[in-house]
Image: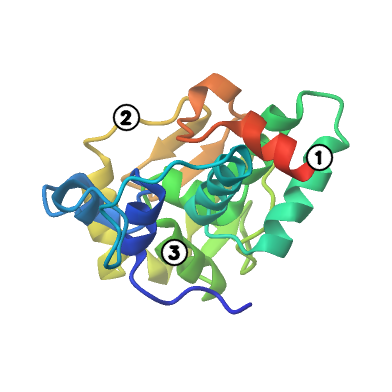
Amino acid sequence: MARYTGSVCKICRREGFKLYLKGERCFSPKCAQIKRPFAPGQHGAATRKLTQYGMQLRAKQALKRMYGLLEKQFRKYFDMASRRSEETGTALIKLLESRLDNTVFRMGFASSRRQARQLVNHGHILVNGRKVNKASYLLRPGDVIEFREKSKGIVPVKEAVEAAQDRTTPPWLEIDYEAVRGTFVRFPNREEVEIPVDLQSIIELYSK
């Protein structure tokens, strides 16, 4: 299946909560989830009662879409998490949060994960001084993320950094906005990451 290229606002409306896919618009009153808090389509406002499987599926779809992953990618991360010694849900969040594109977004160097992925793919990002153009690159504690010198002046990056300075910095990251550089200090704890879905539902879905 090809990557979704339609309106990302419809994705948030379909899931019923913000997935922060639209950048600054998600933080403004113009957010579609605020203006039209119901699913898109002719019958979107109708009340529907989901089965247990339906709730599990929606939880999986929401988390997958939040991080911008396709089914095969997401299943790979779940399988990796399930083989680790710690609780599967915690391991899954650590893997997802340590992706390079997600970290660039969390640091405020991009207004959305989609924009962060584009910046990585186009070769604007350095990890420990070396160019990395793979958005799925998994970071390790101590890795330093920064922009190439000629990429720091890109307008979308400057706008994202300016907006991010008014927000709370994730405790597992250290950020120098002036230098457009950050450090992945450690893996986040489960309670430090705001996830709008029930991880146990996803585990149960894949364990069938």
Seen at 55% across and 41% down, the residue is 55
**Amino acid type for the residue under numbered disc 1:** Ser
Q: Look at mark 1 in the image and give the residue it sits on.
A: 207
In this rendering, the answer to whether 109 lies above or below 59 is: below
Q: CA distance from mark 2 to mark 1?
A: 36 Å
Viewer-nearest residue: 193 or 56 = 56
Q: CA distance from mark 2 to mark 3?
A: 21 Å
Seen at 74% across and 54% down, the residue is 75
**Amino acid type for the residue under numbered disc 3:** Arg
Which class describes the residues within 10 Å of circle 2: few (<14), some (14-19), or many (20+)? Answer: few
Horizontal relation, residue 12 to residue 159: left or right: right
In this rendering, the answer to whether 120 lies above or below 187 is: below
Q: Which disc, if any, is residue 168?
A: 2
Judge whether residue 142 can be spotted in this image: no
Q: In which quarter of the view is residue 165 placed?
A: top left
Q: Residue 60, how many percent across, how many down?
A: 60, 47
Viewer-nearest residue: 120 or 31 = 31
Q: Secondary structure at mark 1?
A: loop
Which class describes the residues within 10 Å of circle 1: few (<14), some (14-19), or many (20+)? Answer: few
First in residue order: circle 2 vs circle 1: 2
Q: Residue 185, how many percent across, how many down?
A: 59, 31
Q: Look at mark 3 in the image and give the residue it sits on.
A: 114
First in residue order: circle 1 vs circle 3: 3
Q: In which quarter of the view is residue 6 placed?
A: bottom left
